[in-house]
Amino acid sequence: MRPIFSRRTVLTASAASGASALVATGTAEAVQAPGKGDRPPVTAQPPTRELRALLQEIDPVRIEATVRKLVSFGTRHTLSIQDDPARGIGAARDWLLAELRSYAAASAGRMTAELQSYIQEPASRIPTATRITNVIATLRGSVTPERVYVVSGHYDSRVTDVMDATSDAPGADDDASGVAVVLELARVMAKRRPASTIVFAAVAGEEQGLYGATHMAQQFKAAGVDVQGMFTNDIVGSSTADDGTRDPYTVRLFAEGVPSSETPEQAAIRRSVGGENDSATRQLSRFVRDVADNDVTGMHVRVIYRRDRYLRGGDHIPFLERSYPAARFTEPAEDFAHQHQDVRVDETGKQFGDLPEFCDFRYIARVARVNAATLWSLAQAPGTPRGAKIITSTLTNSTDLVWTRGTEPDLAGYEIVWRETTAPEWTHVIPVGDVTRQGVDLSKDNVFFGVRAVNKAGLKSPVAFPEPAS
């Protein structure tokens, strides 16, 4: 008989100050979150030995070399020359492809690298028809290759005038730093066998209007690719703010609440039952905290509850617009004298320009470790549960949850998570086993619920937020 977790069990767990676990009557346990302000969250997953070994291979020296090599092309403006072997975006494109192909050579055929090109007809910031090319490496999963995770940085650059395609535009922080993260992840992971597929992308056209990422997202959508998570790394090169203060152990993660792709019907449900803080992207951001805010990355992930910064936008947005969970990593506090600026020294002696001497390469390596911990954990864990529903056919003071069983061969079962509606993170976990329906004697009117999958190695998926169903 399917167990129903009693209201006394879950409420006692909520009230048990300082308790770490409470055994539910004979069947499972409800785990309580740490005290307010403590980390990690109750849903946190400790790094495996495999992940620790992977993270140790990330090399700040190689990251610095990548940033400086990209800067050496003078300008990488999207409208710059494409057939010069030493200068312009074409030279950068060709070097990136060669690097990714060199990593793929060590993958025993699991990784491929290619150019993804199209002709952008005249549009905003594109005065004439222009070839825009993304450089993409795909590491095919060995167990569930149909499930895909994407990490990107943009390799184009700019100066003060967004249409200036000839002046030197070093773009060290914005965004050679993000591309360096992507390349280092590709290098380290190429030798390994992820269960699911990981795509490493250096995209163009970001500064002109997210053109490269839009094309990539459209291609995935048209092909029906199951992208279960996308991250862009954009401006992750410095830990120093414009006032000189430093925060070398924090990275921001921008994660939208109300989905950019929300339909009128979905909006009506959200207004009725809530969930503004429970989009698939918010669940993805919680997963990042679960697996990458710890001692092995040496970083604190500061989740920001908005799509992006004021007046700015990044390559995750085209994915959000196509209903893919996506978020943006960015350094903790920016120095705008080293972004979107002509290289110059003003009358006070202040240096402007996005130059490599203003980058912190060890910081970029730590950001890379956050990305690596996230992507590897996603790829090795089960996929986010599908079909999660709260049954609302009758008025009750308890909750019935249903979901669809995943197809992973190593799937072990599921956990129900819940929290108060005012809590930002999940505070309780209830293991329920290999079932697809579970009752909890706690009112669905008072708390939020979620479901996550667990495999035989104990790795856990992002949470699925259930929709109401009669």
Image (cartoon, helix red, strand yellow):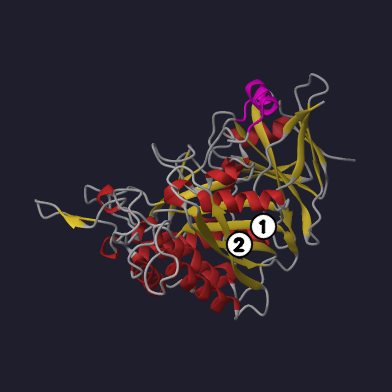
Name the outermost residue toward the front. 128
Lower position in the chain sequence, tag 1 or tag 2: 1
Q: Could you say whether the residue bearing mark 1 is in a helix, strand or loop?
A: strand
The answer to whether residue 415 is visible is yes
Q: Which residue is mark 2?
A: 199
- Name the residue rendered at 67%, 63% in the picture: 197
- Name the residue rendered at 61%, 37% in the picture: 279
Q: Position of residue 156 (x, y in %)?
A: 42, 58
Discs 1, 2 touching: Cβ within 8 Å:
yes
Question: Looking at the picture, which amino acid does disc 2 mark?
Answer: Val
Q: Is residue 22 magenta?
A: no
Q: Could you say whether the residue bearing mark 2 is in a helix, strand or loop?
A: strand
- Name the residue rendered at 63%, 77% in the picture: 107
Q: Which residue is mark 1?
A: 148
Q: Is residue 263 magenta?
A: yes
What stretch of residues is rendered in magenta?
A: 262-275
Residues 30 and 266: in front is: 266
